[in-house]
Amino acid sequence: PSKRQQNITKTDIMSTEEAAAPADPAVVELTNQIASLGTSIVEAKKAKQPKEEWDPFLKQMLALKIQYKEKTGKDFHAPSKKEEPKNPKGENTQAASDKNKEKRAKKAAEKAAKEEKKRKQREERETREREKLEKLNGASNEDVFGDAPMIQSRTKSAEGVSRWTKIGDLTKDMEGKEVLVRGFLHTSRGVGKMSFVLLRSSLYTVQCVAFESKGGNGKPEIPSAMIKYMTGVPVESIVDAYGTVTVPEKPVEGATQSAVEIQVHKFHCVHKATAAMPFQMEDACRPDLVRETDIGAYDHDANNASEGGRVGQETRLDHRWIDLRTPANQSIFRVQSMVCTLFREYLLAQNFIEIHTPKLLSGASEGGADVFTLDYFGKPACLSMSPQLHKQMAAACGGFERVFEIGPVFRAENSNTRRHLCEFTGMDLEMAISEHYDEVLDVLGDLFVHIFDGLKEKCGQEIERVREQHGFDDLQYLRKTLKIDYATGCKLLREAGVEQGDYDDLSTENEKKLGGIVKEKYNTDFYIMDKYPLSVRPFYTMPDPNNPKLSNSYDVFIRGQEILSGAQRVHEPKLIEERAQEWGIDVATISSYVDSFRNGALPHGGGGIGLERVVMLYLGLPNIRKSSMFPRDPRRLIP
């Protein structure tokens, strides 16, 4: 046999041996699966189906071919039909064999070129996806959404604070305008491809909305990641929202700026709330269901529980920095600020000057009440429970004639009631009089009318926000303030069946009852009562010249509760000493005060007002702790 015939015979023998060898079941299964997927791809292409339909088959088949190579060490080739060997026919047979080699080589080259093209396309596709992801991540941190860098006063923009629009200034007249707002994230919710966020700043709220969008036609792209981010920011975090003001078809419920909403383009968290909320803001904002009494004892423990979706008073005070965020509390302390402003405004217009007196004293500023004592460099001292003595020195002895002060007052009284505090803000005034203390009462009456009028004019929104949570009736008052004497007040009580003596001290309950009687009889919640028994007034109170049992003193009432106590003061040194001794006060401890009247003193009078109590009663609040930003009572010294 020829060499060619020997080779053919050898090949046939090898093929026969391979066929006779037992097949690996795993390789057979891989072969069948690859063949099946190949058939599915061919049929799909014949049917002209889109690539998306058969591309998964192709990827699966390529993965199986990799497994095949790992098993066999050879690339997978589809099995071809077995041809019977033909006898060589000389040179023609050799030429045919060479031609087949060329075809096979050409096909192999074409296949290699296709594989290389696919590899390049795959790399380009992966590069595009990577660049897109990097762009999205970069945008979330720097431009479109995400956590903003900490504000450390690193830079200043050209626009400055004018970049931001106050939420309270948003109106439907701004429709189409792009704005940047900042506030607390009050609530957030995601609905499909949308996010709804309610932002709050002081008294005002606005709804911000974002819809997933690919952008185009002048509209910004809103990625799905931004929607998830907006709904995932913790409540009470500080956020910036930038977007376009739009006017919804229906007013937005639950937002003060109900006529507008903001279509958000960018959303950044300025400071993230990381601690768990001690209570929910929705609960802290709920309206009162039951009207509490505003007199009597205050039970700290009973007010500590939070039940029925409502937050207990003590829980609120323990976390006052959060409780202050409610619209009602924001309003209460804006009203309080305005009371001080109006108080100062009126008195300055009446030629009063503002003074500042010491709060560290060597002895009690008044007799008959406890004081907070302390060590003052080895000497006993106390905290001032009134600027009384110093404002008298300034007005009557120092020649200023009309003075006032707004400052802290300390009372070491273990009174756990709804209207007492151990520290409160006093609004005090003192003035020289020409002939009668009614001159002081005229100033006081006009002062409060000025305050009440000013609150109605300047705090209308705040008053309504308080009313939404703590319902109350508007204060009724007369243009000319009602004045009755103590005996008349006692008589009105007796006529109503209440036991009350003309020289007995007036209890809190009877004060409250008298306020109701006066309201019904004179249609006013605000009035003045004078000529109190001398025995219940401080040592520096001027006695009544016609009845030694009475005094030239007075109290001012709102809704049946005292908010000011005052009197004409004693300006004769000898009488001051006598009155102090009657009160058991060591004259030596007030010697500098008494001495100040020995060099000439103007007749004078005045009064001290409790700021927190004025606000409490004006707004009809049931507890003075609601009108004290950080109250101090016998059981509370924090925060």
Image: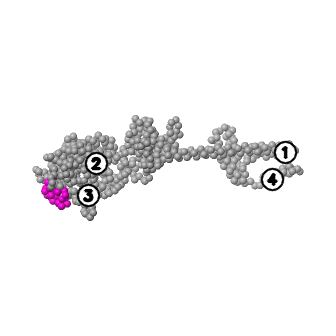
The residue tagged with tag 1: helix, strand or loop? helix
Task: Work out how far the residue at label 2 is from the one at label 1, CA to CA, in angstroms.
Answer: 115 Å
The magenta segment = 571-595
Q: Which mark is residue 94?
A: 1
Q: Which numbered circle lies on residue 14? A: 4
Label 1 Cα crowd, 10 Å radius (few <14 / some 14-19 / many 20+): few
Q: Nearer the viewer, mark 4 or mark 1?
A: 1
Give amino acid for label 3. Answer: Leu
Q: Which mark is first along the chain, 4 or 2?
A: 4
Give the mark, 4 or 3, whose residue is nearer the N terminus: 4
Q: Nearer the viewer, mark 2 or mark 1?
A: 1
Residue under numbered circle 2: 616
CA gap, disc 4 and disc 1: 22 Å
Q: For marks 1 and 3, give the one nearer the viewer.
A: 3
- Quadrant of res 53: top right
Q: Dot 3 corresponds to which residue?
A: 360
Observer-nearest of 532 and 389: 389
Q: Does 631 sit left or right of 52 as displayed?
A: left
Do labels 4 and 1 touch, CB within 8 Å? Answer: no
